Image (spheres, rainbow, N blue to C red):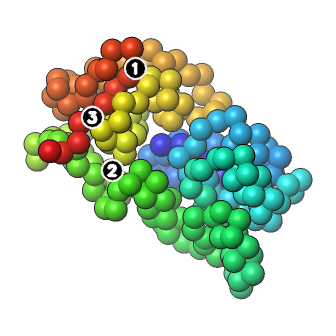
Amino acid sequence: MRVLVVEDEPRLAEHLASALGDAGYVVDVAADGARGDFLAQTERYDVVVLDLGLPRIDGLSLLDRWRQAGLAMPVLVLTARGSWHEKVRGIDAGADDYLAKPFHIEEVIARVRALVRRAAGHASSELRCGPLTLDVARARVSAHGVPVALTAHEFRVLSYLMHHCGRVVGQAELTEHIYAQAFERDSNTVEVFIARLRRKLGAESIKTVRGLGYCIEPTR
């Protein structure tokens, strides 16, 4: 899962990126509105953490621009404490959630998880697809009730497929969502991760739809 953090305060941006990375997300950071707009318009993100007080292009203008362009990724808006009018304007502009500064980083992560789940149509932090269970909050995976240890990249691939359980996900889409913008992406490595996941979870756990991509079947 990929997160875009648009925050002009360097220490806070670094803290957010580090914490979200530790939580299993791939994170890109933009230090101003113009850079944030470029990344959002050219890359695919599962959620955006957006500060409103940005240089070059302010957060509300960015949010309005994205929604006008048809970009529907969930957006968590960060506002100054007490700026209730900004919260209202942010929600009216298309924000999915907001959080007032200062905040606990754990709450940011929890809200990001919730936004990603809701966008994929999941109400619980525990995803179930056939014999597979993925606990998003604890980053734990089990197959047929047996815990399975995964590497960070294996977890990201499985998490994306399970968030989109029942849908065929193309190799290019998977590649975009498991690597950061600055990372040299190689779609061939996705095949390696899929092969490793099948060895750990069972050969039938992930289906290959020839010419289209991969799919995890929903629980029947």
Q: Secondary structure at mark 2?
A: loop
Label 1 and label 3: CA atoms lie apart by 13 Å
Residue 15 visible here: no
* Residue 216: image tag: 3
Eye-nearest disc, 1 or 3? 1
Residue 204 visible here: yes
Q: Is residue 127 shown above or below 40?
A: below
Q: Residue 178 versus residue 73: which sits nearer the camera?
A: 73
Residue 155 image position (x, y, % from top left): 35, 38
Amino acid type at mark 3: Ile
Q: Residue 214 versus residue 53: which sits nearer the camera?
A: 214
| Badge count | 3
First in sequence: mark 1 vs mark 2:
2
Q: Quadrant of residue 141?
A: top left
Horizontal relation, residue 153 to residue 63: left or right = left
User: Residue at image x 31%, y 61%?
Assistant: 124
- Which residue is under mark 1? 212
- Which residue is under mark 2? 139
Sort mark 3 into few (<14), some (14-19) or many (20+) by Cα contacts within 10 Å: many
